[in-house]
Structures are given as C-alpha cells and as structure tokens.
C-alpha cells in the first residue's frame, strides 16, 4: 500500500478517545477481577451483550440531548434500520431479558463489564468511549434487591482497599416526584420543567446551595457576584416552591422570608410518602446488616441523570480529597451509581418488570485507586538477550527460549544489532532487570555474560562499542550456558523481581 | 417510560450479533488469561486502542468489498469527518505507533485483545462483531521477528492444551508475488487479476486442487460435475500459467499435458528467490529452536486475505477433526494468522516501518477448546437463603452476609416469596448446592435448616407449601445459626464444590 499511496496520512485519533498502555491496563485488569469476584460472591452471573443494538431498542434516556443525534452514535443498516452503539449497559440488558424472558431464572442476577459510547462534546477527563461495570437484578420487586446492590457496592469498594473512603448515597425518585407534585409540577405538561428542576438539584456539588437556588429560580450567572459569564436559564419557580424543594432535599439555605410549612406540603403528596416509606425500609435493612455505620446512607439530594429510573437511586461517592484544575481541594466524587428501572424491560413486554442495578465508572474508579497507590514499585520488563554476532541469531533465540521455558520473561533484541549501545538503551527503556551477552569468545567457552541492569544501569548508555564494553563490564558476571536459568533466577530473586511458573506448567 | 410509551417494542438483536452467557464467558476469560501470560513471557506489553478511528487512518484492506461501505461500519462526526469502527487491531496499532513514534521503544512489542467489527453479510458462525487477540513487533526488520511470533503462537496453543493438535503454517507474500511475476502478472495493470489468483489459492481448503485449477482458469461451477449452481468467474490464466502456479504452491494436480519447466520460470523471478531465501532462514530458526518437529512448518499454499501483507504470512490451523454441517469429518481449520506488514505504519510516515504480527480468532479458538473439553463438571451456583417470613428479610440478609463474608457465594431469594416451590425451582435453575431455611420455629431456637440440593434435588420441585415441607425434609439437617458457615463449608467440600477466600482477605 505504501507504494500505491504516496500521500502521507496524519496519524491522529478522533477527539474524546484514548490509547491505553500497560500502566493503565494492568491495574485496571486487577481492579476488574476484584469487582468480578465480589459480584460472583453475591450470586451474580456473567452476561455480555453486543456493542451494536437497534436504535429503538436502546431508547432515548440520556440526560444531555443537545447534540444532533442526541448523544448516541448511530448509523443505518443495509435494510435501512437504524443501529446505535450502546450508550450504557442497562438498555441492552433490558432487551436481553425481554428477548429471553421465559428461559431466564427469575429474579435474574447478572453482571457485565463493557465499553459504552456517548456522542457528546469531549473535554478534559470526558471521553466518548468509557467502560462501565454493571450488576443488575431483574424480576425482584422488593427494595431488599436495591439494598443488597448498595451493600454489594460497599463491599466492592472495601475489597478494592477503599474502606473508610467512600459513601453509598441512596435516594428515591418517588420522593423527588413527590416533591415536584407538592409544588404543582405534576402532569405531562410540566415534564420539561420537572427535568430542569432535577438538573438544578443534580448540580449541587458543582454550584452549591446558592447556585441551586438560582437555578430553581430565574437562573444563574457563571460568576454570580459579578453577574458575568454564561447565564443558565432556571426553572422559574416561585420562592415558596423553592423553599419546599430545598427543604425536601435537606439543603440548608437561609431565605429572607419563610413560606408557610414546607413539610406539610410534602406530606400531602402520596408519592412522597411512598418514597419515604421505601427509604425507611432500605435504611432498616442497612442497619440490620451492619452497613448503618456511614458506608451506606440516605441522601435526599441524589438525583442521577438517566431518565429511566422509577424508584430508589444510588450514587457511590469517594470522600477523600484531591486537587481540582485550580489546585483547590475537592472531594474525589462519584465513581458510579444506579437505581430501580421498573419500566425498561416493560417497554418490550407491555407489563412492568421490576429491575434494579448499579454501574461502576471503571476509569473514574481506576483513577481514584491510582491516586491512593503508595507502592509505586516499577514494573520490570523482560530479560534482553543482545545480538553480538548476527549469524548467531538462532543460537540467541535458543537462549531466550530456555529462559521462557523456565517462566522468565525474555526476548532477543530484534532491531538492527549493529549499534550495541542501542541494544542497551532498548533494555533500559523496557526496564529490563538484566541483559545476557554472548560474543564469540564466550560462545567458544560455552559461557554467557549476565549484566545486572538494576545494579549498573548508569554506565551502560555510554558504552557504544565492543572493545569499550569488554573494558568496563559494570555489575557483570560470567556463567556457563547451562547455568543461565539458575543465575538469572538468582538475580531476579535478589532484586525481588517476580517471575512466573515454567511455561510447561501452564499447559493442559 | 412504560407509562409514556404504550407501544410495545420487539426485543431483538441486529443480525450477526450475539449475547454471551457464563458458559461462554468463563472459559473464554481463562483462555485469554493463558494467552496473555505467554505473550508477556515473550516480552510483549499490553496496549489498547479505541474502537472508533478516522476512516482514512484505518485504510481499506479487507478482502470482501461487495458491500456498500466495503465491510466497515462508518458514520460522520459532527465536523463531517468520517469515523469507522475498527475492523481489525492492526490498522489502529499502526496509527498508534505512527502517532507516538519517537516516544516508543523500538522494536515495539505489544499485545491486545479486543472486539472488531465487520459490516458483512452474517451467516452461521459468521458474526459482525468478534474478538481478536493480537501480538505485534514493530521496528524489527529481521525475519527472526516473524519466526519468533510463530513460535509464540505454537507455545500459546500448547499452553492451552492443544499440543499435537495444531500446525503453524508459514508462507511468504514475496514468493506469491514472484509466482505472479513469473507468469507475467506483474505491474499495476494486473492488480485485479493478481487478487483473483490469490483468492483462488485461498480457497484450496474449500474447493480442492481441481476447484483451484478451475478458479485459476475460466471459472468454477458450484457443482462441477453437473456444471450447475453458481458460477464463479476465474482468473482466466492459460494452462501453462496454471501449471506454474500449482507447481509453486506445491499442489499436486495431474494435468493432461506438461508445459515446459515451471521451476525454471519461478527461479527467474528475483522476488520469488528473495521470498524463498527468507523462508529458508525462518525454517533454520525453527529447527534450531526445536520447533522443527511439525509444530511450525512452511506451506506454500497459505495466502491470508488481508491486502497489507508484504513478507512472511502465517496461519494457525487446528488439525483435529470435527463434523461439518453435513456430518462429514473435516479439519477444525484456522484459528488465527498474521504476517509482515512493512507498509502499514509507513502510510503515516512516508517511510517503510518494518512490522509483523499475529492475530488469534478468539471465538474460533474458544469453540475449538470447548470441543476438546472432557470434564463437563457443572458449575454450581450460589447458596440460596429462602424467605419463609417476609418480615424477616433483614435477618435473612444477615445470614447471606455471613456466608459471603466467609467467601461462600450466597443470596437471598428476591422474587415474590409467597410460593415456596418457586423458591426451590429458582435454586434448582441456579444449580445451587444447597438452600438455607429458617421458619419461625427454627428462628425461635436460633437454628437453621440446610437442604442439600445435590443429594435431594428431585423431591424439591413437588413441594409447594410450608406444611408439606415440614413432612418430607429430604437430604436436610438442622444446625445452630452460629454453625452456618462451618456446616455449609462441610457440605460444599463433601461435594467438591469450590468456594473462595473470605471477603475480608481480598481487601487492600
């Protein structure tokens, strides 16, 4: 192809996507394995669905709909039907359950880790492809299912070493709906304003109580003092309505005046009453199971963006502080959430199917763990066998094979071997614990030289030719070819570099 | 949402996609882990790229281009640029290397497992989403890099228990190009016919020597005897040209006449000579490293469909027999392949960058392993704590929590608890080893009943109420609540059901 297309392409990624190397992937893999182990312990089973679904099967439940195709990557199939990349793992699960309803055990408990896609405006830390790790119980009407999933999240975060550093916050959409009903925003005609109110509450972390009050009222300036910057239009509530809302979500904010008894207005809403009763029951389960120690707690300000929730909603928040872009200390914040979505499977079945689930934001959580990691021990690379004589390639590859058969990561240098310094620089870049050297003299005597790079790394870069090499030999020793494995093992053990079981042991 | 949208959607997947349950996922996960371990042992590092790339960065190298968007799922970004879902993991790697060229160690050895997408006509066993597990060495011009990757594939298949059941076949695109040159099909003007010749050779497994001869000549009928069915137009070669091609790929086929000395024609091609010399060198490396025992061998009929290969090409074939759709025994066939693609990174850099890689077809390989699996021991599900008294939910959840803390998979029944038979049916469907039962009498005495489902599964389904239950108690015993963990552990150990470390042990 290079011959046919002389035009040079620019190598670049679309915005909002990222490559990930071993420094990201190894800790993420370990983290996913721990999550999986806890989910399995709770009786959840693995289930994966494809990345592409019919657009109508996914539905439109995303909070941000300010983009042409409403946050979802979509395209037409050959038969003109619209397909989309999944934007979460819940909508595809609902499709799966509806499609296989009679075959599945009910309640159906399943988990899945997978990439999802949002066609949103990317920004710092905001990607268009990210991974979620979900667990869901479908067919369980009882709030015990919601409580269990919250406890499982607490156990998961503890298993990841985050004990004492998180809180699982629980609220109920019925309570929020009751609040909206109490201030006269029930009915289809108020759907848009209800959403504006919920979005205002969802911004509490970002804009604080005064900001939420402004967003519930006429609106909010980006710089409230100066009344400058972007202006976000508010929900347009009256002060009395705002007082009810703020009372309900337990956000203390001093108003100049009081507006009757907000509590009485809330208690007049049947939905609010039902939501509060469910939360009481959940709280009771937390306490009885020993999670009432602050790991899991009720918080009336939790909203959750997705529109398909119908009951309890949850949010996992990490409570330790990190620095924000401006260097100010802030709570690390949300690493996942979920809730009850009794209507989602029902879209396919014409009857409500109770369901509840929790989704972990894998990248956010991995990033949190990397903040806390104290043992920044470097990962060592493979042992590198350098190429002194080009015509001995087959022999060097044999040495490498011997090391690998013994479970030691090893490779022969595969670049141009002419410049010995480049071979050592390569070993340095791979963070190799040692290199194995065999020139014609050593070969004649059935020997190899082993150079300990952990001890003597610094001198290596300066050595560029064979003669100089033979002079200095820093941190280097000779041994017989037959002792190669034994001596390398000793070196690795001496430096505490892990090495695995023999290759043969893995077979079968 | 269910309230707002009374229209019932049909729950279905687009064609060519599939859901995967625990029976698929658990063995695949174990397989990926083994592959990863071998790749790491060979000094390869994890690297993952995103699912979506600029369409032009991926290029067009797919063999089948008979679909509107040529086998690739594509869509436009907001800025009108075309994006595509990756169709393999090699083109994105080339983009990554070109984009980060100066930062990477060279040679750059990396591996990745990931889903890829082909917008092709789906069929039985032919999906539009499938997983590949690739390893690539970029920046290594020597055929030692190709040889090494073939040996790694042999080690990988042995580590998966396939010793003696596979062959890694190696050919060289330069040999094939030399053959085409030898029969006068060099030059840009013959690009189309060259492709037709290569595709004909690629069909050897399917259509046999006679079929390939027909496809090299005028064409082939689906039913050659009756000259009926579909007719595939051939490459239109003369008999003398066909004789050279068949000689070159070592396909024995009796022609009515001979056409001079095909060998002499091949030896006149410089490309053919170069290709053969490289293969000799590779073969020498195989023999010296101990892989010359039939695990890895030269095979001049290997073509590989992708158009970006420039040198050695490889194919991993499983040699044991399975039944085809018509019940006839056939070799299991290809589970992966690869080759050298020196032009792919160069598309971005304006200079050739040597590179070679191998890609495992994960689903094909997993399916092969499942054929060979003999120990079809059932996977046991969680211990189920049944709900006898609805108002004791919190207490039952406490029992479950105790089991989980001890590393025993457990759950409380979360469906409607009214029908006890349903609770036992659920435990059966989950393949639970035992259920834990506590009615008011047991609770009053601080006891639980443990019912061994492995011993006494059959009777359970018939029991529908509490009274009948108390009569029969099959394979059931009582113990104190404090002994619950100990007694369940004994039961699991007795039946050889694995159970894990205590939850607390996983923390930190």
Image: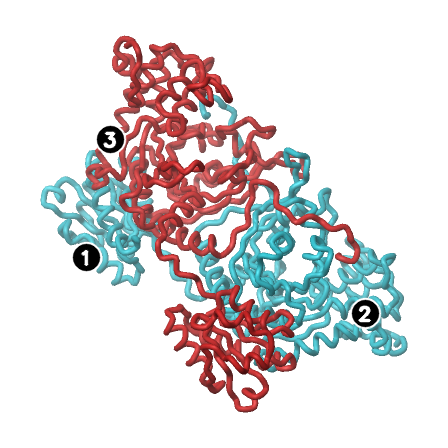
Chain colours: A cyan, B red
Chain of the residue under label 2: A
Q: Which mark is residue A220?
A: none
Element type at mark 2: helix
Chain of the residue under label 3: B
**Residue assigned mark 1:** A486
**The residue positioned farthest toward the left in the image shown:** A445
User: Residue B256, located in which quarter of the rendered image?
Assistant: top left
Check the image and report above or below for B414 versus A108.
Answer: below
Element type at mark 3: helix
Check the image and report above or below for A493 versus B314.
Answer: below
Check the image and report above or below for B417 versus B440.
Answer: above
The CA distance from mark 3 to mark 2 is 78 Å
Q: Which mark is residue A179?
A: 2
Q: Quadrant of the N terminus of chain B?
A: bottom right
The CA distance from mark 2 to mark 1 is 72 Å
Chain of the residue under label 1: A
Q: Give yes or no for contact between labels 3 and 1 (Cβ–Cβ under 8 Å).
A: no
Seen at 66% across and 71% down, the residue is A142
Are dots 3 and 1 on a single chain? no
| Left or right placement of residue B384 versus residue B338 in this view | right
| Left or right placement of residue A100 versus residue A223 in this view | left
Q: Quadrant of the C terminus of chain B?
A: bottom left
Element type at mark 1: helix
> What count of labels does the image hold?
3
Q: Which mark is residue B281?
A: 3
Seen at 41% across and 22% down, the residue is B200
Residue B240, how many percent across, how many down?
33, 10
Residue A420, how many percent across, how many down?
26, 40
Seen at 57% across and 77% down, the residue is B397
Pointer 2 or 1: first along the chain: 2
Would you say residue A167 is visible in this rendering? no
């Amino acid at each position: 192809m290079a011959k046919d297309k002389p035009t040079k392409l620019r190598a670049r990624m679309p915005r909002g996507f990222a490559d990930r190397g071993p420094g990201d992937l190894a800790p993420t893999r370990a983290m996913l394995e721990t999550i999986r182990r806890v989910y399995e312990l709770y009786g959840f089973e693995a289930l994966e669905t494809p990345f592409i679904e019919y657009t109508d099967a996914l539905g439109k439940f995303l909070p941000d709909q300010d983009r042409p195709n409403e946050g979802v990557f979509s395209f037409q199939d050959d038969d003109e039907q619209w397909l989309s990349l999944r934007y979460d793992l819940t909508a595809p699960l609902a499709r799966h359950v509806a499609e296989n309803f009679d075959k599945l055990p009910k309640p159906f408990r399943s988990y899945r880790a997978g990439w999802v896609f949002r066609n949103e405006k990317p920004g710092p830390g905001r990607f268009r492809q990210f991974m979620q790790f979900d667990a869901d119980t479908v067919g369980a009407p009882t709030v015990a299912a919601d409580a269990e999933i919250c406890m499982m999240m607490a156990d998961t975060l503890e298993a990841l070493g985050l004990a004492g550093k998180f809180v699982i916050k629980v609220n109920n959409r019925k309570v929020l709906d009751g609040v909206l009903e109490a201030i006269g925003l029930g009915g289809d005609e108020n759907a848009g304003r209800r959403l504006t109110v919920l979005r205002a509450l969802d911004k509490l972390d970002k804009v604080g109580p005064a900001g939420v009050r402004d967003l519930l009222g006429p609106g909010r300036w980006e710089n409230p003092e100066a009344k400058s910057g972007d202006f976000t239009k508010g929900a347009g509530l009256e002060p009395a309505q705002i007082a009810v809302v703020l009372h309900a979500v337990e956000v203390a904010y001093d108003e100049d005046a009081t507006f009757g008894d907000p509590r009485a207005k809330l208690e007049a809403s049947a939905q609010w009453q039902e939501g509060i009763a469910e939360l009481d029951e959940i709280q009771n389960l937390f306490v009885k199971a020993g999670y009432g120690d602050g790991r899991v707690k009720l918080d009336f300000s939790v909203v959750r963006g997705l529109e398909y929730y119908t009951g309890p909603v949850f949010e996992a928040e990490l409570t330790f502080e990190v620095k924000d872009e401006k260097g100010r200390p802030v709570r690390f914040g949300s690493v996942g959430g979920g809730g009850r979505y009794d209507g989602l499977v029902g879209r396919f079945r014409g009857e409500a199917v109770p369901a509840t689930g929790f989704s972990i934001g894998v990248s956010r959580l991995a990033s949190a763990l990397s903040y806390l990691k104290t043992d920044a021990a470097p990962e060592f690379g493979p042992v590198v066998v350098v190429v002194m004589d080009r015509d001995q390639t087959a022999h060097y590859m044999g040495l490498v094979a011997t090391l690998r058969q013994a479970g030691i990561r090893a490779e022969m240098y595969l670049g141009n071997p002419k410049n010995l310094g480049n071979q050592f620089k390569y070993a340095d870049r791979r963070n190799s614990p040692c290199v194995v050297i065999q020139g014609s003299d050593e070969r004649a005597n059935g020997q190899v030289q082993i150079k300990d790079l952990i001890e003597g790394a610094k001198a290596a870069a300066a050595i560029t030719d064979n003669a100089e090499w033979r002079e200095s030999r820093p941190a280097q020793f000779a041994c017989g070819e037959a002792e190669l494995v034994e001596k390398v093992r000793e070196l690795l053990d001496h430096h505490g570099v892990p090495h695995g079981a023999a290759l043969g042991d893995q077979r079968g």
